[in-house]
Image (cartoon, helix red, strand yellow):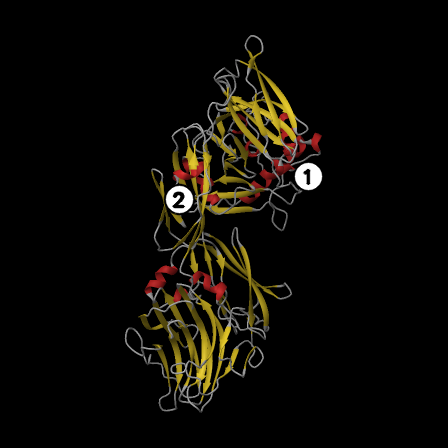
Amino acid sequence: MVASGSNGGTLLLWDVTPYTSKSPAPNIVDQDIPSNTAIQRYEREMVRLIYFRPSDRPRRQAIDTELDTLIRWSQYFFAEQMQEYGRKTFAFETDATGAAKVHHVTGKFTDTYYHSDTYDKVVKEVADQFDTSRDVFLIAVDVSSEFINNEGTCGIGGGGWKSFDNERWRRDFGGTAVIPASGVCINPSITAHELGHVFGLEHDFRDEAYLMAYGTQERLSHCAAEWLDAHRFFNNDPTAVNETTTIAMHPSQASGPGTRRLQFELTDTDGLHQAQLIVPAAATDPAQGTKLHSCKSLNGKNQTIEFLTTNATVTSDSEVKLQVVDVIGNITRQTFSLKGGGITSNRSPVAVGTIPDQNLTVGGNPTTLSISPYFSDPDGDVLRYKAESSKTRVVAVSLSGTQITITPRGIGSASVAVTASDGKLLVTQRISVQVRSAPIADASDTFDDSFEGTVLQNSNWQWQNEPANWDVGETRDGFLHIEAETDRNLWASDASHFLYQETDADAFDVETHFFARWDTASGVNGLVVKSPTDNNWVTIKFWSRDAGAKGQIQYQTKGQQTGNGLTENAGFTPTFGNTVLFLRLRKHGDTYTGWYKTREADRWIEIGVTNFPLTPPLQLGVYAGVAAGAGALTVDYAYFRSTVDTGVLASPGLQFAAMEAPSETTLLPNYPNPFNPETWIPYQLSSPTDVTVYIYAINGNLVRRLPLGHQATGIYQSRSRAAYWDGKNEVGEPVASGVYFYTLTTDDFTATRKMLIRK
């Protein structure tokens, strides 16, 4: 004898004799599903499959096939039982081949951690990666105990309830069912039973042949089939409209010896479909908790219904629940106490207003809120509170009395659920929290320009002293081309050709790559950030000098040429006439840091750090000019972008920051781009996963597959960690110039970007 359960904590007994060694379990992988089932597929909400493996458990090789067969049998069972209703059934997620798509999730902890409180622990980790409020998730947990929560529990299924007002509760559309991934419990009957709980079906012990009983589980009851006829997951194009059902109970009355009459008034402008009376399970039932007493078919928008109960099932001090599904599948539930003749004796706490959303910064101060003003209890009961973060790697929460403290931990978004309880009923508010770093993370969306095409790609650019001879993609294909004019001095007259974007960011980290041709002792170009308010700036620039002095890299401010971390000559002295350089400028608060390098593959060389307050708004960009009245300087800027190669930084502080676990999986821009013949494809992973990169031609043909294997959580941006493509196809032939697409795929993530080979 083993057990199942609902997420209300009910223990459900199961006779698993047919699945023990005396009577081996059928091999669900080998069972054939009839090919003529004509099961209809849907486009809306669906069942999604997850294989959850503790961090120290080996992966089951055939699990995808086993779960595919398991979900098909469950789908087929419901279709067969819904013959009267057009063989309706649920849909499940499939891949491009039509097989069930199984998402693989690796747990944060080892096997023994999940032997207790399995359902809560697993669902919490899954909810960090998937939206469980919309779709249903069937989660197969690979624990060595081969049971859920403890020995004897074969599965737990259910959906969440949300308080609509101080008495009524609405059922979430989604839900979760958790079963073991191996052992006697992974079989079609248990899977269908737990999915039934998710679809809103209560235990029904009136006949052991019913699916929601613990006997032979051969069929759905009439109540269950009629209930599912209106359920959202069993219908095409379910509407999102929901007018919650109004439920009122008349005072209960005795109706003869040992009987009690329960009468309810129902109103729903969407239209009523079915009502179910849920009562306490009897001591003789195979499971404790609650069970279905009976159901009533409904029609119209207003109806009075009546249930006749006995003292054996409902006593004078019992609590009963009435749950109603309307014609578009929305479910409402309300609890009634029979004390005092059937008037609800305890009302739920209620939310008062909305707790404000919070915007925090990594490394910044936590925020503390008093939450008591946002809740009240209509009965005057003392409320107790609890708070929980949806993503602890983004924010941590602590609670002291009625004070909640939210502490930022990582970049991303999260919600904090704050629950008020009177000891019996509860209500929850959610605080939306956005945690940002210094706007380095936003820079790629704000500043970047690849200087492709015939115009500037970023609409935020502005010119100061626009040069007469400049263009993008025409004079030099794929470059911002500037032919600098004379008497364009950044230092004295601020007359240089300056292409900039305005920003009030407290931090940024940008770089550029340029080719300079010069025959003058006074050409200047590079990166600069200006404050028009202060009439001052910080720049890292290349100063082209004569053949004897060669060139120099300088890191300066307008009013302070050297000292305080600045340098007049970084020690780089290129030969006369042609220079190729990479420059980088970082702002963090009032601290500015400059780097340079001469080759893409080199490490950044730090040339100075200075504290130099500049009043925003700031102007950030690239410039060029000939400071003297004669001479020539032509500059081709290849790009302007936020730094992506953080894995090879010379700054130890930034190297440490780059090692922090990212809050989301992301595909980043390849570098260099354009390239010939090789490029690196950076990305970051929020959880351990299998990773593959696919290279496609512009016509969609697959050019190259780069299998990267199973990789840990982390940032893969440096050349030693990013995906590498040598510009060749699968047979080792160099590909032609042109546009290509690269796609990153993991267990549950896919993204595509564009790149250009120029030969």
Residue 609 seen from this side: yes
Q: Which residue is found at the position 44% from the left and 71% from the top? A: 620
Residue nearer the viewer, 396 or 663 = 396
Residue 127 rendering spot, x and y as whole percentages? 48, 44
Residue nearer the viewer, 332 or 1 = 332
Q: Is residue 506 positioned above or below 560 on the image?
A: above
Left or right of 213, for residue 410: left
Left or right of 250, for residue 106: left
Q: Which residue is found at the position 57% from the left and 38% from the top? A: 173
Q: Which residue appears farthest toward the top when viewing the image? A: 257
Where residue 259 sits, quadrant-wise, is: top right
Q: Which residue has dot 2 on it?
A: 109
Name which residue type carries label 2: Phe
Residue 225 seen from this side: no
Residue 18 rendering spot, x and y as whole percentages? 55, 27
Q: Secondary structure at mark 1?
A: loop
Q: Is residue 103 positioned above or below 263 on the image?
A: below
Cβ–Cβ under 8 Å for marks 1 and 2: no
Residue nearer the viewer, 232 or 681 = 232
Badge 2 crowding class, 10 Å Cα cut-off, few under 14, some 14 to 19, many 20 or more, is few
Badge 1 crowding class, 10 Å Cα cut-off, few under 14, some 14 to 19, many 20 or more, is some
Name which residue type carries label 1: Ile
Where residue 212 sits, quadrant-wise, is: top right
Residue 545 rendering spot, x and y as whole percentages? 39, 87
Q: Secondary structure at mark 2?
A: loop
Residue nearer the viewer, 722 or 272 = 272
Mark count: 2
Precedes in sequence: disc 1 or disc 2 = 1
Cα separation, mark 1 vs mark 2, equals: 39 Å
Residue 605 rendering spot, x and y as whole percentages? 35, 73
Q: Which residue appears farthest toward the left when viewing the image? A: 563
Q: Which residue has dot 1 on it?
A: 39
